[in-house]
Each structure stands twice: as structure tokens, then as C-alpha cells.
Amino acid sequence: MKIAVALFILALGSAGCASTSPKDGFKDLAAQVEKQSGHRVQWDQGGDDDRKVADALTKLLANDMTVEQTVQVALLNNPSLHAMYEELSIAQADVVQAGLLRNPVFSAGVTTGERDALDPNIIFGVTQDFLDLLMIPARKKVAKAQLEQVRLRLVDEVLGVAARTRTAYFMLQGAAQIVAMREVVTKAADAQIELTTRLHEAGNFSDLDLANETAAFEQIKLDLGRSQADLVFAREDLVKLLGLWGNAAGGFRIQSGMPDLPADEVTLDQLESSAIAQRADLAAAMQQAQTLAYAASLARSTRWTGAISLGAEVARLKDGRVVVGPNASIELPIFDQRQAVIARLDALVRSARLMVRGLAIDIRSDVRRARARVVTTHRFATRYKDVIVPARENVVRLIQVQYDAMLMSVFQLLLARQMEINAYREYLESVRDYWIARSDLERAVGGRLPGARSAVAPPAPAAPAMQGAPDPHANHKP
């Protein structure tokens, strides 16, 4: 009995010291996010730190943001992330609840057998579930495992938002540069159609040739319109991730040039083992399997005991004395030995462990696939930069020389210039695809790659200059 009283007092003391604040859990979450991504996270709860973060966001949004600055804005300002942080509060509350005793049960009853001895003829009683007291440590173990699972899952959610923001950033950068390139192409086509119209009016161009040139010009304008629409959509995708609205949604700016290709790609060895070691979603899945195993163990430990309650009954005798007697009850597990609960938990444990295995296989495959994309897109972009674009520039230079010597027609020169610009546009697309592939690889690995890019990256090279259209009345070879 003394042991039971001691445990009861200890349980009351631990319940009084328990805190529902999720600050410690969020502190661990923030530390892991910063370690794996290099970015800060802040949970907006109206304190001084939140006001400092708001000031920092204002300063970031006032300048042309780099990709890393844009990711930082998303992690600090995305309202969906702040909503998910409340899951830490829920899980922490569950930990506190798991450490609390069930309330004692008060009872009162009228007896007829002792009416000559009792005054009044009522027996009062109070009981407490003793087994519940003994199960507090096990319940808290399960609840703390669930809290850790929630924390790891939220880390993965934060890193996912960072990866999506990085991808949206490069999509917006690429869309803006492609629009600029198509505008150059449209200007060149406009000059060509003007020349074609004048030659047609002078009788030097057939109706069929004019119709073909006109149709091609309309297609070029349509392509420009599509690219402009893609630019609007890409910006809105980034706006959502940044959590901006109103003037801020339309006023923020990013750097105008995509980062150039790195001269040498970083080593991509041992990425699979790194991913298995640091992927938060895999750690969360493993923690879920462990949590279910704890719950199954708890269910087994109580399958033959059921509820055990201890208490006391109090009554007043007619001579004025108060008598107290012990009371005890135990649940008889005759019909329900928790076999269904245990079977269900065992199935969930097996399923969770298989899910961990499957996720680990998927992660390794995702890393290999993302690594192949990085290598392939880097090779393609380098080929465009070092071979295709210079070759197109050389073609334009050679045709320009022959055009000046009246050995090439103006249409050959304009076509060569359009092909040069198209090659450069494809180069920009390949650079964009490379940085997106690299971002996907970082996401697959679960952290920054070795030799990660700096926050301020060198801009992409300028678009090739487009000279004015030749004079159709000049004495050149038609």
C-alpha cells in the first residue's frame, strides 16, 4: 500500500511539472533544418523574434533576391508551414496527457442490510485505477515516440517546401529569359516580314512566299504569347510558396540571370548512403514503426490484467463513529483478452516495417535517377554552350561576310540569326533544367550537396545582339 501511495504522489508531481509548450520540439526541428539546408525557420507566435523576422523579410523583398534568399523567405513566411507546426503542439499535448492519471471515481449508495447500524443509511466510496498508474511510463514512451515522428515528418515538409521554392525560382528565371529571347526572335521576324512585304509590293516576291512568311511570323508571335503566359504562371507558383499577397505579390523581384554552369561538377559519390542517413521522411517512417511496436508491447503487457482499481468506502455509524474500509476491483479478461487489438497492432507494425524498406528502396532509386539527370543536363548544357551556340554564331558571322559581298541573300542572313537565337534559347532551357535537376538531387539526398552553390551566383551570359534588318533597297543580291 505504501508503494502505491508513493507512486500516486510521484505521478501527481510529474503531472504538475509537465508542460504543453512545443518549444523544445520546434527548437530541435529548426536545428535539423538548418543543418541539412542552411536555412532558418521561425514559428510566428507574436514574440520579439517574430518582429525581427518580419523586418528581415521586408529587407529581403526590397532587393533582387537570389535563389537562397527566396527559399529563406518561403521558409519564414509560408503560412502552410506555420499551420503544420501546430502538429507539434498536438503531439506535445498527447505526451502530457499520457502522463496524467485518470480521475478518481466517487460513488455513493444506499444499503438496506445495515440500516440499523448506519446513520444516514449511505456508504460513500472513492476508487482509483491502480493499473493506470503503473502504465504511465509506457504510455509516455509511446507518446514521445509519436512526438518524434511528427517532428521528423515536419522536417521533411520544410525541406520539401525549400525544394519546391528552388524549382519555382529557376522556372521563373528561365521563363523570364525565354520571354526575352522570344521577343528578340519576334523583332527579327517583324523585320523580315516588313522586308518581305516591301519586296512583294515591288514585284520581287511571290504571293506564296509572302503567305509562308506571314504564317511563320504569326506562329512566332503565338510562341511569344505562350512564353509570356508561362512567365505569369511561373511567377504565381512562386508567389504561393512565398506566402505573399497584395502589393508584395506583384512587387518582389528575383535576379534576372540564371546561374551559369559550374566549371566542374561536384563529386556525386556515396549519395545513396547519405540519403539513407539523413532523409527525414525515412527517419519518420522508422519512428512510426517503432511507435507501433511500443504500442503493441503495451497492449500485450495488459492483456491478462485488465483494469485494477483500489479505493476506500466510508460510512457513519449510528453511535457517531466513522468507519473506513478498503475496496478493490479487477477486470476479468474472460471475453476480451485484447486479441483483436494486438492482432491489429502487429499488422500495423509489419506494414510499417515493410513501408520503411520500400521507402529506402525508392530513395536509393530517386537518388540514382536524380544523379543521372544532373549529369545528363550538365552535359547537354555544356554542349550547347561550348559547341552549338558558338557554331551558330560562326554561321551568322560567315553569312554576314558573304552577304556584305552580295554572295548571300538577306533571307539567308535573317534565318541564320533566328537559328542562332533559337540555339541560345535552348541553351537557357538546358541551364534551367540543370539547376532544377540539381535541386531535385538535393531533395532526394535530403540535404545540401558537397560544394553547394553560393547565395550569389554569376549571371548567365547576355543574349546575342540582334542587328537591324538590312535595307531592302540596298544593292544586294536578291
Image (cartoon, helix red, strand yellow):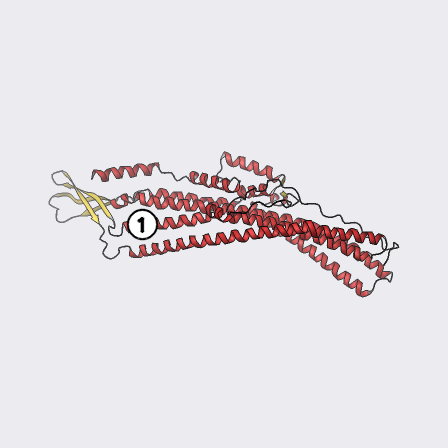
Q: Is residue 94 left or right of residue 371?
A: left
Q: Is residue 117 left or right of residue 99?
A: left
Within 10 Å of disc 1 (Cα), the crowding (few <14, some 14-19, many 20+) is some
Badge count: 1
Q: Is residue 360 left or right of residue 313?
A: right
Q: Is residue 231 visible?
A: no
Q: Position of residue 365 (x, y in %)?
A: 50, 54
Residue at the extreme top: 48
Q: Position of residue 43 (x, y in %)?
A: 49, 40
Which residue does the image show at 73% across and 55% down from the upper left? Answer: 419
Residue at the extreme bottom: 208
Task: Report which quarter residue 143 is drawn in.
Answer: top left
Which residue does the image show at 49% across and 44% down from the upper left? Answer: 82
> Which secondary structure lies at badge 1?
helix
Q: Is residue 272 visible?
A: yes
The residue indicated by pointer 1 is: 297
Q: Is residue 190 above or below residue 78?
A: below
Q: Position of residue 360 (x, y in %)?
A: 45, 52
Q: Position of residue 448 (x, y in %)?
A: 53, 43
Which residue does the image show at 75% across and 62% down from the upper left? Answer: 215
Of the residues shown, which amino acid type is indicated by label 1?
Ser
Q: Name the quarter where the N terminus is drawn.
A: top left
